Image (cartoon, rainbow, N blue to C red):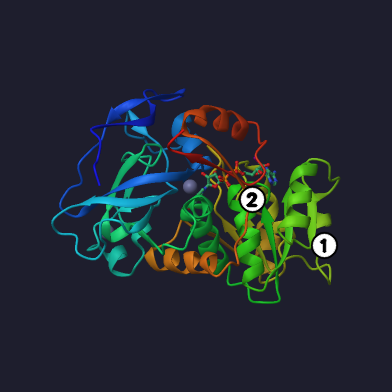
Amino acid sequence: MSIPDKQWAQVIEKTGGPVEYKQIPVQKPGPDEVLVNIKYSGVCHTDLHAVNGDWPLPTKLPLVGGHEGAGVVVAKGEQVHDIEIGDHAGIKWINGSCLACDFCQQSDEPLCGKALLSGYTVDGTFQQYAIAKAAHVARLHKDIPLDAVAPVLCAGITVYKGLKESNARPGQTVAIVGAGGGLGSLAQQYAKAMGLRVIAIDSGEDKRKMCLEQLGSAAFVDFATSKNVIKEVQEATEDGQGPHAVILVAVNEKPFQQAAEYVRPRGSVVCIGLPAGAYLRAPVFESVIKMVTIKGSYVGNRKDTAEALDFFRRGLIKAPYQVVGLSELQKVYDLMHEGKIAGRYVVDTTK
Ligand code: 8ID
Ligand code: ZN
Ligand code: ZN
């Protein structure tokens, strides 16, 4: 396999953007790294946060974004023995971690203080050839389509982990807030596969249709037109007591301040979305007498990754996605900024 010296990439030269489509050099993998020829990469709202620089964590600059990259291993360092050239692999948000600290030892590698973040602190997957630590790349069976699996590499892993963290059990009800977006659409599929009943919360006819007709949710609450979101969510549960868990994947502060009010007594509120500058708020009285659990959930570890991919490989996860050329990334960001994307966009690095 011949590796070119130059390749197409989308580069953020300065915080705030826009992204620039141009040719840059192909890098060489270090001793414990692999070079992956990225075929497809999903576009996550985190990539837009990276362009805008709206989180309290600086990005590298210039930066190649992207962290849902699926492709083929084309080169590897001399210490890499458990993945071969020609194997299919996925580059996810956690590009690498120390594997030695307290958190890594407990397989909490997303919490590693030395974690490298794809498309944020190291260059990511909006390029044709990207690098990751071999220990952390997702192993993809060759029968898995590389376009459809791309969104699983961040969105899928993250919502699967969040659903596990919620401790919701089969037969129970979970509310997904931000259900029409990338994480939300996959969350509905994972929840369904895990035997949960879903209340989808988002806005607009396209997203309502997608959630109820394509993704199998039992109810849809439109946050923009509802007169009382809290009441409507509770009434959508069989006994009116509210959902057992709430998975927050919206990019807006308000729903983070409503969830504890409609969650069921003993229920859990799992925060995943990362709206800029937002604070959590919950009424102390109701939270105490309802014994509510409120927690954060951050991507997933390597085992969560393998499990989330296995659900996908078994045909249980079918979320809508649209493929456009890598050259059109800025247009995807514009649509995402306006909240106009139902499901996920995936970029094809050859176009
Ligand atoms: O590990 C993590 N915690 C993690 C991993 C991956 C992504 C966190 N994230 C974060 C992203 O950085 C982003 O902040 O999750 C958030 C959602 O990412 P996404 O799914 O990629 O975003 P999207 O496709 O734009 O979907 C967001 C949806 O939220 C809806 C929008 O209509 C859109 O469909 N939404 C908004 I904005 N306000 C809402 C509200 N008040 C709402 N839905 C319900 N109620
Ligand atoms: Zn992401
Ligand atoms: Zn570590």
Q: Is residue 37 left or right of residue 281?
A: left
The answer as to whether callout 2 falls within 8 Å of ligand 1 is: no
- x 56%, y 28%: residue: 331
Residue type for callout 2: Pro
Residue 211 appears in which quarter of the rendering? Answer: bottom right
Residue 169 location (% of width, % of height):
63, 76
Identify the residue at the far bottom of this view. 170
Q: Are marks 2 and 1 in contact (CB under 8 Å)?
A: no
Question: Height in image: 312 above or below 61?
Answer: below
Of 238 and 17, the residue lying toward us: 17
Q: Dot 1: within a 10 Å radius of its alpha carbon, few (fewer than 14), some, or many (20 or more) residues?
A: many
- x 50%, y 57%: residue: 158
Q: Is residue 292 visible?
A: no
Of 275 and 176, the residue lying toward us: 176
Q: Nearer the viewer, mark 2 or mark 1?
A: 2
Secondary structure type for disc 1: loop
Residue 317 location (% of width, % of height):
60, 62
Residue 114 location (% of width, % of height):
27, 51
Question: Height in image: 22 above or below 166?
Answer: above
Q: Dot 1 corresponds to which residue?
A: 236
Q: Dot 2 corresponds to which residue?
A: 320
Ligand number 3: quarter of image: bottom left
- x 76%, y 43%: residue: 206
Residue 28 appears in which quarter of the rendering? Answer: top left
Q: Is residue 169 visible?
A: yes
Residue type for callout 1: Ala
Of 184 and 282, the residue lying toward us: 184
Q: Is residue 244 left or right of residue 11?
A: right
Secondary structure type for disc 2: loop
Q: Is residue 330 left or right of residue 258?
A: left
Whichever of callouts 2 and 1 sits on the residue coming sooner in the sequence is: 1
